[in-house]
Image (cartoon, rainbow, N blue to C red):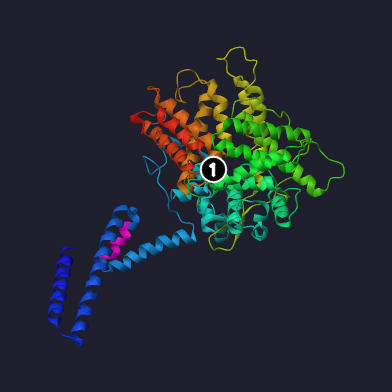
Amino acid sequence: MQSNRYLVSYLLRQIWILEERNQGRENGDVLLRHAMLAIRQKHEDLRKKQTAHEELFDLLKTMPETDAMDVLHRIRAGGDAQDILNHVKEGNLLMQLSLVPENRRRYELPRSRDMPAFTLVPSNAYLASLIYGTTFRVSDTRNSSSLLSDPNAYEDYSPYPKPYHAAEMADSLLQKAIPSQWTAVSSDNEFLRQLLSAYFMHQHLSHFYFHKDLFIEDLADGRTKFCYRLLVNAVLAAGCQSLSQIPDRYKFWLPHNLGYRFLAEAKRLWETETFDGKSRITTAQAACVLNNITDLNGMDKVRAFYYREALAMMKRMNLFNAHVEGESKRAFKGRLFTAWAFFSWSMMNTYHFFQPPDIRDPPITPLPGPVRFPEWYGEAWLQYGNSGRQRPVHLGCIMQTRCALHRIMNDIGYSTFREDKESPDQPPISLSQALEFKAQLETCFTFSTEYHKTIATLFQPHLSTSVLAPNEAQNPSAHILHDARIALETLLRLYYLRHTFDSLNSMLFPIITLTYGLAIGDLNHSSFDFIPRDALHSTLILSAKYMESQGRCYYLANLVRLAMKSRMRAEDV
């Protein structure tokens, strides 16, 4: 590198000498000009080569060890620095654009590159999953080795190792719709379709307030049965929270913020549509969307207002009735879908706020089987890169499973948050009741974070006042809580390693707050040694990362992050 600088100085000196000799000559000498151009070109080539060497040296300091060894082998084989640099850059770019599944971790866990040792136990079913196998390059899991060796199976399961935020929603009908006909905020239809797609990708799968296909069909055709201006503007306001291209989208109070403008338009339309006291299904659906927006904005009183309004509308419309005379199949599908969505949504609005349920019983008519009738639910389709293949998210399976889970959680909330407890120190339900609820939950789905959180909160009150390791405890609650925590800690880390927390995912919010609270509690007990303190610190940092990333989407995460920071000690960070 030093010799290059001397050579550059020498060439510059030669250029100066030649220019001095050329002064005073009107026509100039052609050979002299050619020599000067050649020297300047040599100087430029050397400058680029020096820059390439410096950039390559910087990359070697930061890239993974396996990649760095590959680069060193190329250098020792006599490869040109610029060619090697281009090879590295093009390889990274192609990996990002094509999103070919590979067994490489995209992100690093805080404090440690590996999964905490306390999670590596035989009872942890997630260690045999395809995602774990591809993330940690485990070749002997039950799923990863067999699936990845079969080309057909590999193609079917190839989305699993890919980050979700790399996908795009594929809906041909939405691309033909003219959303600007439904809002006064923007006339840019391409951008409005992006907002709708962002909403369906990042919020609809967790909060399915309305039937997506019925909504988009009416949006495109100009019908108002399942699409109305109020609902469209509410969805667009929620879409602003989901679209990463919008700067400062969490600052809902700024008048120039797009989310603010769509929300203001929705509030104006709300006043117009509710003035006469009539109840439309789209107005109730819009109240659900507005409830979620204001909840994420930290506006609790406004959130509660929209919840009460939607609940009152649902009761006035008798939404949970089995049949309505003269109702078409399309209308019945929209009403039944919304009824179960309302039941699920109402449970979350009470259970997570430690209140008894407002809706005691679910709709009379059950949901159709999602395996036999997947199209009934309005499937959402994703496309990764330029593969051309569209993949379903299996919305029907998601909705039916969550509704079954929420039905049991509704019963738990009814028993747990009653107001007739004899003593505030008394556990909300007995241990035998908790075990009965656990048996019911296991009939639904035991692989979701929501299931494990429910188990953890169900048995946490039954632990003794002193924190004991599971192998020392006589109370089965300690064993159950121990397994639930292992599952939650594993799932959160697998999710972060594959997707990070950058995209909006409010469903993880209560999960993160629970694991954070448990970790803080463990750190405050000096006798607690089941989970190593370094692993607990890693959980705290991971929780803070989630709130920091989600804080770019909605304001509530920023408030919780500040509350978390206030509870942490200097040695905990």
Which residue is at the front of the view, 1 or 428?
1
Counting from the top left corner in percent of width and height, residue 184 is at: 64, 51
Is 235 a magenta residue? Answer: no
- Residue 362 seen in this snapshot: no
Asked whether residue 315 appears in the rendered view, the answer is: yes
SS of the residue under disc 1: loop
- The answer to whether residue 76 is above or below residue 502 is below
Q: Where are the magenta residues, as a range?
A: 68-75
Amino acid beneath label 1: Asn
Q: Residue at x 26, y 64 (%)?
A: 51
Q: Is residue 248 above or below residue 432?
A: below
Q: Is residue 145 positioned above or below 495 on the image?
A: below
Coordinates of residue 269 in the picture (x, y in percent): 68, 43
- What type of secondary structure mainly makes up the magenta span? helix
- Residue found farthest to the right: 326
Label 1: which residue?
505
Give me the residue at 46% from left, 41% from top.
Answer: 493
Q: Quadrant of residue 180?
A: bottom right
Q: In the figure, is residue 315 to the left or right of 529?
A: right
Depth check, front residue: 293 or 132: 293
Mark 1, Cα crowd under 10 Å, few <14 / some 14-19 / many 20+, is some
Query: What is the quadrant of the N terminus in the image?
Result: bottom left
Q: Quadrant of residue 77?
A: bottom left
